[in-house]
Amino acid sequence: MHQQSPIGVFDSGYGGLTILKELVKQLPQYDYLYLGDNARAPYGTRSFETVYQYTLEAVQWFFNQGCELVVLACNTASAKALRTIQQKDLAQFGPSKRVLGVIRPTAEVIGRFSESGQLGVLATKGTVISESYLLEIAHFFPDMTVFQQACPMWVPLIENGEHEGAGADYFVKDSLDQLMSQSPAIDTVLLACTHYPLLIPKIEAQLPKHIQVVSQGEIVAQSLANYLERHPAMADHCSKNGHIRFCTTDSTTDFDEKGAIFFGKSLKSEHILLGH
Ligand code: DGL
């Protein structure tokens, strides 16, 4: 029997579920294997070396599960680990294995959203420091000016289920004020962290009405659909039973409860260990 080969979707925790939700919407025929490294989240404040090590362990786990294609649905892992994994580690896993990220597909299209050419990027500290968005966007849209703002309190608030609470208002306003003080001409704000879509109502309430808030789910799903069209051998290899399996490195009870908020549907997870 042909081994099942789901598309692997990885995040430090729950955020990647906002991407998976769109992947399933646009490409429902495929099987997916989601892994949240909740036991070691957040990644956003960790060093390059640590994020690389953790992400590599996850990628290895996906390949051991039969995946051929893995999407790092986490900007921090994409910024800090993807290039090294692609250039240094991938060859040892086999010639047909692929790992994709979320930064490049976003950078490829983000210029189309802005009229002023002034873009605000909200992300974790790790993503901001990596300057990955500055480099990638300059490549595709050299005339665009990009202003970055780290929002270190946002992921902890979201992971703790406080994203709808009054406490979140303060931190959302604080980070947005800092972003907008860099340039009043910003007309597009990119949520460059897969957790942030949960804060959209508060973000939109704080920003002037003419500013467009862009999240990555649809962009990444469209890009994956294009990728699979351009790579028919990979598309053929990925199994298609419309099945989704959810795994977490921490409590399954917590994952099932909080994950449902991100995924927009109830789900049932399994516990796995990484790095053993
Ligand atoms: N969801 C991750 C991202 O897109 C960050 C969460 C974390 O800090 O672990 O960057």
Image (tube, rainbow, N blue to C red):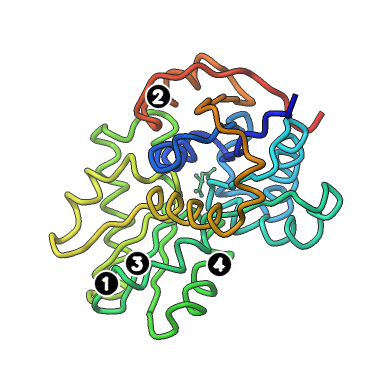
Can residue 36 be seen here? The reply is no
Question: Quarter holding the C terminus?
Answer: top right
Q: Which residue is drawn at 44% across and 35% down?
A: 28
Q: Residue type at mark 3: give it.
A: Gly
From the Cβ of disc 4, is ligand 1 less than 8 Å away? Answer: no
Counting residues from the start of the chain, the first of labels 1 and 4 encountered is 4
- Indicate which disc residue 132 carries: 4
Residue nearer the viewer, 248 or 164:
248
Residue 177 image position (x, y, % from top left): 27, 61
Q: Which residue is drawn at 48% across and 34% down?
A: 29
Q: Which residue lies furthest to the left in this view?
A: 209
What distance separates the C-alpha of mark 2 from that of mark 1? 33 Å
Q: Residue type at mark 2: give it.
A: Ala
Q: Which residue is drawn at 83% across and 49% down?
A: 94
Residue 151 image position (x, y, % from top left): 41, 53
Residue nearer the viewer, 47 or 63:
63
Relative to 37, 156 lies left or right: left
The residue under label 2 is 260
Counting residues from the start of the chain, the first of labels 3 and 4 encountered is 3
The residue under label 3 is 120
Relative to 113, 137 lies left or right: right
Please say if the residues under marks 3 and 1 sit with CB atoms less than 8 Å apart: yes
Counting residues from the start of the chain, the first of labels 2 and 1 encountered is 1
What distance separates the C-alpha of mark 3 from that of mark 1? 6 Å
Q: Quadrant of residue 84?
A: bottom right
Q: Which of marks 2 and 1 is in front?
A: 2
- Indicate which disc residue 186 carries: 1
Q: Please say if 31 is above or below 114.
A: above
Q: Please say if 112 is above or below 128.
A: below
Counting residues from the start of the chain, the first of labels 3 and 2 encountered is 3
